[in-house]
Image (cartoon, rainbow, N blue to C red):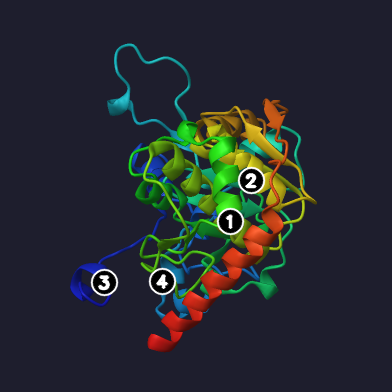
């Protein structure tokens, strides 16, 4: 914007992240919030928490308003936005990055050390303990900060989209243990990647292919897609050095083959499937219970709200050799793609 619309940009008085802009538009004061500011924005130095060198170089940091905690009250809903049936105080909170709200919900469930896999069109992993100094950004890794200001490593994989491409409309429920056993026994596998993002396997974008004998049925397609996504997610977890419990929420938490294969591929970690379907909304609602009090108390104390999660048993398959062969073939294609480039 600054480069393409210099005259308009020169008139800007304040730069706000989206969620804090919404709060401001509803009647609150202008503020920044750490999870929103640090979400893949390149505006925050993840080591110090201050403005990034990029923000300082272009002078954007001078347009950032004062920071507020996600749970901090920043004003009241404007009178013209209150209908005749309005109830409550209309207190506006600073707000939060959506995936961080989901992450917060599991902190409220009493979890401290874990990796959350938030699944859908993308599979986004948040890890509470990864060392960001050893991360490889070429493997689709980023760093975010949570609402408390702690830096977290995040991995990304276009899992939902790639599953859809491979499954060709077959739902995850169509995958079966018998089909998985047959694919593993035959050495049939999907190699990355079926989207324009290589995810944890850089250099594989749009190189996806199926090797080995394969029958075009919904059952086999859904099963192959499930195994493939489990293998790719395992690579993403390696990239952020995930070592604690793995919580899966979203649509993939209902895919039994994906879950059991992931549990088999991560033998040192428990895999838990969450029954929570509204984690982002529930995490945002937690902020209301944490908010700063009118009497000057700072707030920020998380409520304890349990959530149901079920432990996943590993698939009764020998996935060790299957994974080694998959990695070998995937990396061979990766090297060829890099060389061709």
In the depicted view, which residue is nearer to us: 220 or 101? 220
Disc 2 to disc 4, how far (Cα)?
46 Å
Q: CA distance from mark 3 to mark 1?
A: 48 Å
**Picture disc at residue 324:** none
Provide the residue designation for mark 3: 10
Q: Residue at x 65, y 40 (%)?
A: 260
Q: Earlier in the sequence, mark 2 or mark 4?
A: 4
Residue at point 19% right, 73% down?
A: 7
**Contact between labelled residues 2 and 1, with CB atoms less than 8 Å apart:** yes
- Is disc 2 in contact with disc 4, using a CB cutoff of under 8 Å? no
Q: Which residue is mark 1?
A: 231
> Could you tell me residue 92's position as x and y percent?
47, 34
Using residue 87 as the reference point, say whether residue 289 is left or right of it: right
- How far apart are the two marked residues, 1 and 2, measured between alpha carbons? 8 Å
Judge by depth and name the residue closer to the eye, 181 or 242: 181
Q: Nearer the viewer, residue 173 or 242?
A: 173
The residue under label 4 is 60
Placement of the N terminus among the 4 image quadrants:
bottom left
Residue 122 at x, y percent in the picture: 45, 50
Q: Is residue 206 visible?
A: yes
Spatial CA span between label 2 and label 3: 53 Å
Q: CA distance from mark 4 to mark 3?
A: 11 Å
- Circle nearer the viewer, 2 or 4: 2
Element carrying mark 1: helix
Name the residue at 46% across, 64% down.
192
Q: Which mark is residue 261?
A: 2
> Reading the chain from its start, which is encountered first: label 3 or label 1?
3
């Amino acid at each position: 914007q600054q480069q393409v619309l210099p005259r308009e940009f020169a008139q800007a008085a304040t730069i706000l992240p989206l969620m804090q802009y919404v709060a401001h538009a509803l009647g609150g004061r202008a503020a920044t919030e750490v999870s929103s500011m640090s979400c893949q924005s390149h505006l925050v130095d993840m080591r110090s928490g201050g403005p990034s060198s990029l923000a300082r170089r272009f002078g954007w940091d001078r347009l950032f308003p004062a920071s507020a905690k996600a749970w901090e009250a920043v004003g009241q809903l404007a009178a013209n936005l209150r209908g005749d049936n309005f109830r409550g105080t209309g207190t506006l909170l600073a707000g939060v990055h959506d995936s961080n709200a989901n992450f917060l919900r599991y902190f409220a469930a009493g979890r401290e050390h874990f990796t959350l896999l938030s699944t859908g069109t993308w599979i986004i992993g948040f890890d509470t303990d990864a060392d960001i100094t050893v991360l490889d950004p070429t493997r689709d890794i980023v760093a975010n900060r949570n609402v408390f200001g702690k830096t977290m490593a995040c991995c990304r994989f276009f899992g939902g989209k790639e599953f859809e491409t491979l499954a060709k409309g077959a739902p995850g429920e169509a995958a079966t243990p018998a089909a998985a056993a047959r694919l593993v026994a035959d050495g049939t596998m999907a190699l990355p990647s079926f989207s324009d993002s290589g995810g944890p396997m850089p250099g594989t974008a749009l190189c996806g292919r199926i090797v080995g004998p394969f029958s075009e049925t919904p059952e086999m397609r859904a099963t192959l897609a499930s195994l493939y996504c489990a293998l790719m997610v395992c690579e993403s977890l390696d990239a952020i050095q995930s070592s604690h419990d793995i919580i899966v929420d979203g649509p993939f938490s209902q895919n039994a083959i994906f879950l059991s294969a992931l549990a088999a591929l991560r033998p040192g970690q428990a895999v838990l499937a969450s029954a929570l379907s509204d984690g982002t909304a529930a995490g945002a609602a937690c902020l209301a219970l944490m908010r700063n009090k009118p009497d000057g108390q700072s707030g920020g104390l998380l409520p304890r709200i349990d959530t149901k999660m079920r432990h996943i048993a590993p698939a009764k398959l020998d996935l060790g050799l299957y994974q080694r062969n998959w990695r070998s073939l995937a990396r061979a294609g990766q090297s060829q793609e890099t060389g061709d480039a």
